[in-house]
Image (cartoon, rainbow, N blue to C red):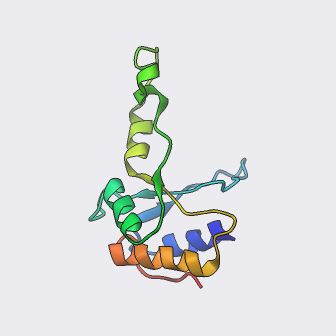
Amino acid sequence: AIAARYDDALGGSGSMLEPARHTPWADPTFWLYTAHLSPAAAVDRDGLIDRLDAAGIEARPIWTPLHSLPLFADAPRLGGRVAEEIFAGAVSLPSSSSLGAEDQARVVRTLAEVGVVAGSPVA
């Protein structure tokens, strides 16, 4: 239900925060709800996280690409550019199983105040 409400809130026209894409061959667990910030947004990922934090809302970047960690600095790898681009713009929003609709609506209202979603359709 939490993911569906975020999908509805973020999927509208004018949204600068795109819901994660789902493939037909996999069912997401929604342990985390991650969305990707458009490069055209007036705020970057860290700025968005800071604005949410200032409103008392905890959000976080997605997992750091492994090839970027010191432990794997010398490990052989192929590519990495796509992971880096995703990491630069992806944010995980609050999605605890205890997150109520009213609290989630506050998250979406704050996202609208920051200017990354068009409105606050979450009920």
Q: Residue at x 34, y 73 (%)?
A: 114
Q: Is residue 38 above or below residue 78?
A: below
Q: Is residue 28 above or below residue 10?
A: above
Q: Residue at x 56, y 81 (%)?
A: 122
Q: Where does the image place residue 37, in percent across and percent down from the top left?
A: 39, 58
Q: Quadrant of residue 41?
A: bottom left
Q: Is residue 19 left or right of residue 22?
A: left
Q: Is residue 93 above or below residue 107?
A: above
Q: Where does the image place residue 30, in percent across and percent down from the top left?
A: 66, 56
Q: Where does the image place residue 42, in percent across and percent down from the top left?
A: 26, 65
Q: Residue at x 72, y 47 (%)?
A: 25
Position of the N terminus by quadrant: bottom right
Q: Is residue 66 left or right of residue 2?
A: left
Q: Residue 16: in sight, yes or no? A: no
Q: Residue 60: in sight, yes or no? A: yes
Q: Residue furthest left?
A: 42
In front of the other: 75 or 51 = 51
Q: Quadrant of residue 21?
A: bottom right
Q: Quadrant of residue 110?
A: bottom left
Q: Residue at x 60, y 54 (%)?
A: 32
Q: Where does the image place residue 117, in percent across and percent down from the top left?
A: 41, 73
